[in-house]
Amino acid sequence: LTIGIIDVLDRVFAGPVCEPAEWDKRVVPGKIKEKLTEHGLKGTCDLENPISTDSGLADEFWEAAFELAIDLGILCLDTRRIIKVSEDELKDVLRNLPTDIALGDGRDRVHIKIRGPNDKLTFSGGPFGICLSEDLYVPICQSAAQYKEVDMLIPGALETLHGRPVRAGTALEAMATFEELVLAKQACRRAGRPDMPTTSVESNATGIGTISALVPWSGFTKWDLAIVSAPAELKTTNYLLTEAAHLQRTGAPIWMYHHSFIGGVAGPPEGTVLTRIAANILFALVYGAEYFQSSIYDLKYIGTCGREAIWATNVSGRAMARNSNLLFCDTNNPVAGPVTEMMLREIAVSAINNQVDGASWCCGIRSAGGKFKDYTTGLESKFCGELLKAIVGLKPADANDIVKKIIPTYEEYLKRPPIGKPFQECYNVKTLKPTKEWEDVYNKVKKELIDLSVPLDLGC
Amino acid sequence: MTFMADVNKILEDLSNSVINGDEEAAKKAAMEALEAGLDPIKAINEGLSKGMEVVGDRFSRSEIYLPEVMIAADAIKASLAILKPKIMESRRSEVNRGKVVIGTVFGDIHDIGKNLVATMLSVSGFEVHDLGCDVAVQKFIEKAEEVNADIIAMSSLLTPSKIYQKDVIKYLEDKGTRGKYYIIVGGGPITPDWVKEIGADGWGKYSEDAVTLCKRLVEEKPSKPLAEPVLVGE
């Protein structure tokens, strides 16, 4: 029953034919509607209670999503053929997933594991794919790595290399990703955490970058995470499969990353619950992935912190945690930027949801929606890490009460959020200390959370 | 049934074919419109456009989602393929908002933002030529030349791919044809500063902003390239 990458490739070239437009317009949406109807899941999104306490609902979504995975499979955009999988194959892959993987080494070692409500989430913090200036790359990464609340470093993307713009699919992509890993490791060393695990590279647009950088001579180890990033929840390409084949041979655990969009192909929030789960199950099989990161974005504001997105993230997380050993994480994607109260409130809602939805790890921070060069600092990662530690053991019903008080403070601004300030305007780039203005904002929001009974300490 | 009743029924059928995303019904209603001697421009403006408005409203209220809008766009295209050739040359500009060549730039296979903009432009009356994802610089230009486009629209989600937006503009400049097209850009990492830096003509924050931007460009017809880009939704 166990199938490997070679078997997957057989199906890439021989599976049923389907045009991508047909897949997006009719095949996937039609099957999602069918599953939501069959399982009585239509209209279950509860906007008044973004954090669900209904385990039965989560289990029903799991059943529907598992069926969806079998019925659909994954479309290869290059060959325009569907990689179909059987129920037995999916059950086999789920049965054999690891439940605890160690990353990093020495005193920087951390574990991503199946977690109980009284275990702290492992937190991967840093500039998370945000475009960074070459000269600020190390200081920005180090500004996150220096905080003990950050367990793993997720670096940013280099905009230029030696002053030249990085171009996907060229030698510059290969060189830039290699350099990113070298610089990220340098940032960890400078922070006094030489064996801190790093989570991949961020300028790997075409696969050239992954294959160039994720090799031992860049500093990459098998105790780091290696990313394969899909364009959408139920699609793949030849070069993503090439990345997976390469990574399987490095011995490093493969980290699968994809998004579902409320309003997109999956339709309503309930549809994205299904696609998020189904895609994770399928990517475990197709790529041999062992860690799963998937965000549920809302197309209305391209973010993840509104009511519908939090609800869908919560229910899909709860479904996976209760029914599988998928080591999944949620992504912390605030649309507001550094030095704004809104960004910290968005981070808080996302982190609180992450703690109670059963995820094994948390990854962030995509400050200012990840759109603006250098709009990212270490302080938001510290804030998220502190919060995750403070809320260990929080019950879903209590979490729901807290987020219901925070979301109304920012939801009307999600479409036009304040983008805040870039790193160099809110951090001393030499001492890597935040400005007083930024520290004051951070303490103000922490005080708000303390007033909501979250046991945080003030101070930076 | 009176002639007026016939006309109203046909206009309603055209509108409903869009709302229901029914390509066959859209073709049938378009044929009936022509057979009844209905002015094709009236059929478009009072039939298809009414349906488009309903679809747009439902999408903005999250009553329907991207797939339904894409299917509605297909119905519109099917109907227009029958109606447009029957419009007198002198009156075609009344229904042709403009031609847009759109795609996600080289090295990037993310398509949801591009699909959304392409669909919203289609249902807003633009003739959209969607090149898909991972589109090489020259392909944008070849297609724009082939269809005599008004606008080249480029999407990018990835930092190492967005530079190809600049490459398209630079290529057109070096070829001496920059002044033929409005160039608009969008996508995750695309900011107003980037738009100015690369010399593009416009940017929209969301898909509805992209439609507003394209309408403004083709209606106001500012000289190309624009000295300052039009930024909608900033």
Image (spheres, rainbow, N blue to C red):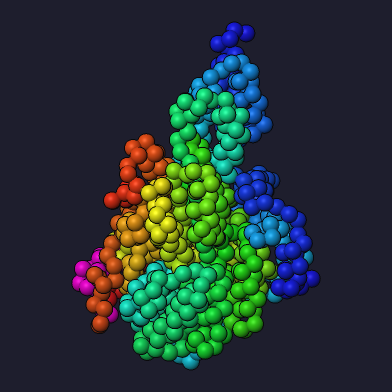
Position of residue A191 relative to residue B207, above or below, is below
- Furthest residue to the left? A436
Viewport quadrant of the N terminus of chain B: top right
Q: Position of residue A256 (x, y in %)?
A: 57, 69
In the visual, does A203 lie left or right of B33? Answer: left
Q: Is A246 located above or below residue A279 in the figure? A: below
Q: Residue at x 72, y 61 (%)?
A: A83
Identify the image quadrant of residue A26. top right
x, y percentage for residue B82? 61, 29
Q: Is A48 or A175 nearer to us in this picture? A: A175
- Residue placed at 61% from the left, 83% from the top? A250
User: What x and y, as percent, mark residue A288?
Assistant: 66, 73
Name the residue: 51% across, 39% down.
B127
Examine the residues drawn in magenta and state their main secondary structure.
helix
Q: Which residue is at the front of the view, A241 or B27?
A: B27
Q: Is residue B202 left or right of residue A208?
A: left
- The magenta segment: A432-446
Magenta-drawn stretch contains A437 = yes
**Farthest residue toward the front?**
B176
Left or right? Give the position of A371 relative to A311: left
Q: Is residue A273 left or right of residue B199?
A: right
Q: Report if residue A32 lies within the magenta region.
A: no
Furthest residue in direction top, as rendered: B2
Q: Nearer the viewer, residue B1 or A266?
A: B1
| Residue at x 32% of width, y 78% of height | A135
